[in-house]
Image (cartoon, rainbow, N blue to C red):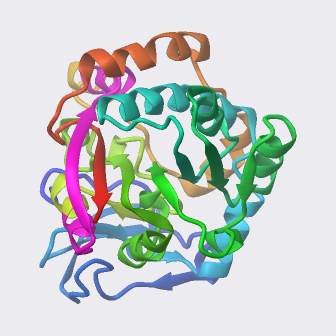
Amino acid sequence: MVNVLERAGSTRQSALQPVLRTRSVCPLCKSPRLAEALRLDGFRIVKCEACEFMFTQDVMAPEAITDFYVDGYHDARHAAGQRVNASINMSVLDSLGVDVRGKAALDIGAGFGFLLARLRQRGAQHCLGVELSRAQRRYASDTLGLEVAAGLMELRASEQFDIIMLFEVIEHIPEPAEFIQSILPVLKPGGSLIVGTDNFTSAAVQTLAAGFPKWIPHEHVSFFSPQTLTALLARSPDLRLVDTRSFTTWEMLARSLLCRLTSGRRGGVVYDYEADQRQDAQRKYRLFTLRLAINQLWFRLAHRRDLGGAMMYLHMRKS
């Protein structure tokens, strides 16, 4: 992995520098043996030489992370993307054999609540979300009539769930092992934990290298492979693996093909923190109608049972 990734972007001081903290050991295995894998606009992504987990070395302090998400992620582009992802995630649950009817479901990173609304329509008995973004919680509550908390601490005492979902959440977590342990008490014995995240050793990453669009090191700070994600979840003796799925979106396949055809000149995205912040609210979610119509079908046609695709999903069960 280290050999094929190109360094990209400048090494100038990031605007986030005053609120960053440096991690000197691996968040998974606590080894101090780290090697630089990639540098993006001053952010160092390092790889643990002991367990091969990759992560952003300098991350926001906990209070800065909270502030960042509480006031962000509320524009129309994020809403459109979440609508599309909700349709895909319903198919993921179906493919993994997760029946929500009559169940209590918790969606961590619930966003605007589109997935929870679908679960309610499917017959889930109790749907609850956890979401840091104030604007997204308000939309889920006021527009969709959903119950969404700002954090796990707001859950009712002794409340437990049959299904807990972490769709595209774990990559945002600086300490993923501790995070997984923190949610297990609210998962019922026999309950299902669904974890979905990007595969940073997939063919798409190998092709696009530093241009892979999911390298967003100020937000995505934990970069998993099938091996490191499986190892993370296997750390808990209370969890056992039930099933896996993965797929590569047609959009990512198109990017990869364009990159190959142009010898890397097109298809990728060059990360720039300051430009990302300036342009984020103005960006459009392209081809929304098309993606809403076909992406769920694409998953059904293109998913595989191994974890080799660019998006991977694990279904764990608590003993």
Left or right, residue 149 beside residue 253: right
Of residues 286 and 126, the one drawn nearer to the viewer in this rendering? 126
Residue 122 found in image quarter = top right
Residue at image point 29% right, 23% down: 253
Tell me the residue at 54%/64% (across/down): 160
Q: Is residue 61 left or right of residue 90?
A: right
Q: Establish if 287 lies above or below 123.
A: above
Q: Quadrant of the N terminus?
A: bottom left
Residue at left 47%, top 70%? 183
Q: Position of residue 231 (x, y in %)?
A: 19, 66
Whether residue 252 is in magenta: the answer is yes
- The image shows residue 163, relative to residue 30, as above or below, that is above
Q: Residue 61 versus residue 212: which sits nearer the camera? A: 61
For this orientation, the residue located farthest to the front is 102
The quadrant of the rendering that contains the C terminus is bottom left
Q: Is residue 151 left or right of residue 209?
A: right
Position of residue 61 measured from the top left corner of the image (x, y, whole percent)? 59, 81
Residue 204 x %, y %: 24, 36
Front one among 26 and 299: 299
x, y percentage for residue 39? 35, 63
Magenta residues, start to end: 231-258
Q: Nearer the viewer, residue 114 or 228?
A: 114
Q: Is residue 128 above or below residue 122?
A: below
